[in-house]
Image (spheres, helix red, strand yellow):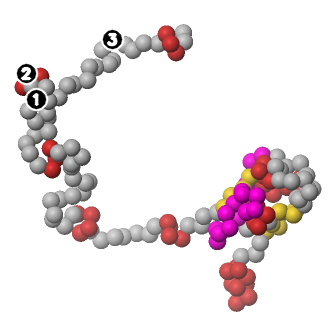
């Protein structure tokens, strides 16, 4: 059996209903849209939660609870396999070098090295975070994974 041999079961595909083609078709005149107004127009309709101008329920109720969205840390990520494609003469890898290579953006997000792929040469890689598999692969190849110190952590240690 091949894809070109497949066919639908009898009754699985229905004819498209032709609306607005006269009263005899069952969907003439208003074509199943009721009377006049906003919902009868093409592209018309009211949004979810709209209560005809009355203050909607979702605005009446108090906002409660905690959402971590505002405090989440977003990382710029690079896989080990992508580092292996860098020029052979490069021995030390940091954010500036990755940005010039087009692998990350130069922004305030911290940099994290992930372990997908293989690295065959010794590289000294400086980043904010490393996955455990990435760190193991770097060290297995004879390289070094240098973790940058977070300024907030340094300030917290100094105050203690």
Compute the Cα span from label 2 to label 3.
27 Å
Count of numbered marks: 3
Marks 3 and 1 in Cβ contact (< 8 Å):
no
**Which numbered disc, 3 or 1, marks the residue that appears first in the sequence?**
3
Nearest to viewer (mark 2 / mark 3)? 2
Q: Position of residue 72 (x, y in %)?
A: 56, 67
Marks 2 and 1 in Cβ contact (< 8 Å):
yes
Tell me which corner region of the image, top left, top right, bottom left or bottom right, holds residue 31: top left
**Which numbered disc, 2 or 3, marks the residue that appears first in the sequence?**
3
136 or 125: which is nearer to us?
Answer: 125
- Badge 2 marks a residue whose secondary structure is helix
Q: Name the residue rendered at 28%, 20% in the picture.
A: 14
Q: Name the residue rendered at 83%, 50% in the picture.
A: 84
Tell me which corner region of the image, top left, top right, bottom left or bottom right, holds residue 95: bottom right
> Does the magenta segment cover residue 101?
yes
Q: Which mark is residue 10?
A: 3
User: Circle 2 is placed at which residue position?
Assistant: 24
> In this orientation, does residue 16 appear?
yes
Mark 2 surroundings within 10 Å by alpha-carbon count, few (fewer than 14), some (14 through 19), many (20 or more): few
> In this orientation, does residue 136 appear?
no
25 or 78: which is nearer to us?
Answer: 25
Q: Name the residue rendered at 76%, 67% in the picture.
A: 96
Q: Position of residue 60 (x, y in %)?
A: 24, 69
Is residue 8 toward the left or the right of residue 126 in the image? left
Is residue 124 toward the left or the right of residue 67 in the image? right
Q: Position of residue 3 (x, y in %)?
A: 52, 15
- Badge 3 marks a residue whose secondary structure is loop
Q: Is residue 56 above or below residue 9?
A: below
Instruction: Give the residues in magenta.
Output: 99-117
User: Circle 1 is placed at which residue position?
Assistant: 28
């Amino acid at each position: 059996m091949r894809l070109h041999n497949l066919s639908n079961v009898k009754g699985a595909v229905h004819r498209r209903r032709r609306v607005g083609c006269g009263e005899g078709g069952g969907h003439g005149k208003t074509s199943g849209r009721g009377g006049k107004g906003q919902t009868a127009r093409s592209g018309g309709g009211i949004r979810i939660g709209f209560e005809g101008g009355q203050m909607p329920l979702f605005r009446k109720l108090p906002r409660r609870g905690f959402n971590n969205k505002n405090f989440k840390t977003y990382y710029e990520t690079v896989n080990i396999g992508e580092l292996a494609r860098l020029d052979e003469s490069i021995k030390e890898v940091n954010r500036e070098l990755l940005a010039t290579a087009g692998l990350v953006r130069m922004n305030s997000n911290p940099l994290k090295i992930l372990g997908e792929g293989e690295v065959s040469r010794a590289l000294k890689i400086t980043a904010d975070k490393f996955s455990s598999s990435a760190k193991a692969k770097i060290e297995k190849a004879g390289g070094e994974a240098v973790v940058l110190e977070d300024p907030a952590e340094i300030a917290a240690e100094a105050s203690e």
